[in-house]
Image (spheres, rainbow, N blue to C red):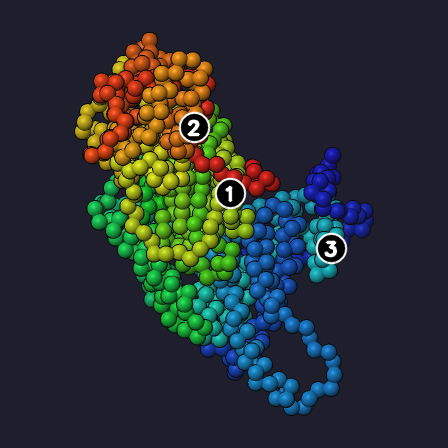
Amino acid sequence: MDVYQEAVGYLESQQIPVEVEAESDVLDEDVFQEETVSCLLSPLHTESVDLPDTPTIRSPEEMLERRLVVLRGILESEEVYLSELEVLLMVPELRDMHQCFYAGLKARLDPHTHTEPSPGPVDPDPERERSSAEETEMKQGGFELMVGDLFLKMVNQIGVYRGFIDNYEKAVEIVRKCTHSDHRFRTLAQSMMSNNGSDKARTKYTFEALLYKPLDRVTKTTLVLRDVLQTTPVEHGDHTALQEALRLSRSFLSGVNEGSQCKREVTLSHGMRRQLMRDGFVVDVCEGERNLRHLFLYTDLLLCTKLKAVAKGKQAQYRFCWYLPLAGLRLRWAADQEGPADTHLRIHTIRTKMYLLRQQLRQHVRGSRGLAARSRKKLQQMELLLLTHSPVHRLELHSPSGKSHCLLSSLYELDEWREAIHKLTRDNIETVPPDLLTLTSACVKLRMTQQPPLHSLNTGDEEDSLCGTLTVAIHSACGLQHPASVYVCVEVDGYECYDKQAQTHSSIQSLSPHWDQELTFQVDGAQNLKVLCVSQSEGGEDAVLGKASVKLDSTTLQKRWRRQTLPVGQVEVTLSLKYCPHPLGPPSSPQQQPVFNIPIGAVAEQEGVLVPHVVRCCVEEVERRGMEEVGIYRISGAASDISSLKTAFNSNLRDAVTRLRTAEVNAVSGVLKLYFRELPEPLIPTELFQSLARALNIQDLDSRLVSMLSLLQSCPDVNRQTFLYLLHHLQRVSERQEVNKMSLMNLATVFGPSLLRPPVASLGHGGPTVDISQEVVVQVQVVFFYLHCNNLPAAQTSLPHDTDSEDETTHM
């Protein structure tokens, strides 16, 4: 099969009809050939466009009318361009970006599209044809039409054009070689476009002309933005956003010319050229100080810069901070160091101020744009402070030269950086010492990320975002290649007024870890949920096994749990989501409620489970490394270690689980015994003591079993499920009694007095009394009897998450 037939076959497999013409009918001339050639010989043509002065149109009404015409023209042009991008199957990123822009612009223009009046006699006096009320309505409608955020979002993503531009010459050269070898390639694009189905797109193109379309489109961006800005009154809410979009567009185009030349001057090993692969904002830690920095990842090095403050209207500039060669660079996850004691209080104060600013913005009425702008500016400053001081995940960078740096951000973002760096370091590219002044100066032109990831910078509609309480129940995972201790980290977006990240405790070493743990978030403006599955090694270093992002849909999450199975790398995580919309109150203090000396029902309700986390974590840790420990549960750990772990569980579950990993195993078992011993009411309710004592005296074994199980069933749900959970664990411990020397009787002797207590007779009142000499016997015998049962029900650790029948499982 020749190359042409192979191309036709591929297009037909993509359901793109192709009209095959005879070679004699092929046109001999290329459409737009001159444009294509000129682009190869010269850089992208950018006009010297300054920010426009006061618009020349005399009245706001005329400006807004003209603005609407311009926007409609842009919408039509976008529709044609999208059809052209559909033919260029190799650039889905461009298509997706413009599809999003087109859909947003169309949705906002539709309410302002009116049917033209029917032809009729024209009134010579225009004042009679349009009343002043109609003029006011038109003017207000024009001011209400906000599109600046759409243009700004598109321009912020314009960096995706760089890959197309950088490879344009190679693509044209390949097309020309194919054309010279087979002239039918000249009409292949023409055939595809003629079958596109859009009347506006039925123009005959060659492949060269189609390849030129994105270049032509990106160079006209500044002209389009200038037209919109010229027809936008200065007092319009879009004016500032359009000014910024125009500035960024000009910066990108000039950067294509200057930056591309800069990149061509540096050739790396294997004949590669230095290119910008990724950039974004992270927190850089230097001598204990945290600073927000703009990080640039090139083919052979990592460059950290600081964005210098410049006067309004001036071009942004960067200042060099540091750089690290990628050759030999080692990456390491590390736990974040504890900040000053007042850090949590400072963060809580900032969040409270942000909450008040959000309330002010919601209450601003039309006409108070100045006040709203000032409040939004303060909100951005507060969010920037939180972005700098609240990250808890860090990625250490270690160079062979001995230089090290530490980056802080969300776990999801840091893993994106880790993957990008790791992919480049595998190629063993030698680093060419850079001209730091030139490289740093080029950052303004080359950057693809324009603004820090502040939610307050988003000026779009928030109707589809979540505001209220989002609960994520993490059930289990499967697909691990080797047994591992795994935890799941969950991140949400939106405003920073509330905690946006939480994680489960670490599981025991297992191929199929289970958590059944609920994570609750107060969300404001949330649209996305990010899930990471993380493995924890013996040394405490974490390794991200996989990550995934979920789009939050408020319509499907309300009222009922929605169960989902989410592919997270090679692992599948099963979770449930539920969303309850409601007005949000001020952010609460991050103080965790204590768990010791608290009724077990209250602790379970607070955690949204049936078996408290302190019980499960201690049990899992004992099963991980204490099953063959001689005298486990009989030999006590150090009192100081047990007290330290108790304090950790009362203040920070995540910290407590981390400490469990390294604590002496007898201290872990001591914490579990202490928890049951310090319960205000025993796990087996006191009022059942007498009934259990009588049931033990029943001679018939079957009747005794029925009576004992019936009494167990009468316990409250949390007490019963926790007791069953503990019983199954102790049975597994006794299975190793030839090594750990802990039989069922030994275990019953240890736990009996903690789990069951006799009633205390009130002063001055007669009542049933228990012989003290028999008290311990009853306590031990009751636990021993249940441990001997072979048909105990399985323990349920979490509350059932009922879902609609059609939504029981969703594979994302």
- Residue 37 quadrant: bottom right
Q: Residue at x 34, y 28 (%)?
A: 688
Q: Point out the image quarter for the N terminus.
A: top right
Describe residue 769's horizontal placement relative to residue 470 as left or right.
Answer: left
Q: Of marks 2 and 1, which one's residue comes earlier in the chain?
A: 1
Q: Mark 3 is on which residue type?
A: Gly
Residue 713's label in the rendered image is 2
Mark 3 residue element: loop
**Which is more toward the observer, 322 or 512?**
512
Q: Establish if 281 lies above or below 513.
A: below
Mark 2 residue element: helix
* Cα–Cα gap, marks 2 and 3: 69 Å
Residue located beneath label 1 in the image: 561
Describe residue 448's horizontal placement relative to residue 342 as left or right.
Answer: right
Regarding residue 622, the answer to whether it shows in the image is: yes
Q: Mark 1 is on which residue type?
A: Trp
The location of residue 361, given as percent across then percent down, is: 40, 65
Q: Mark 2 is on which residue type?
A: Gln
Residue located beneath label 3 in the image: 197
* Cα–Cα gap, marks 3 and 1: 43 Å
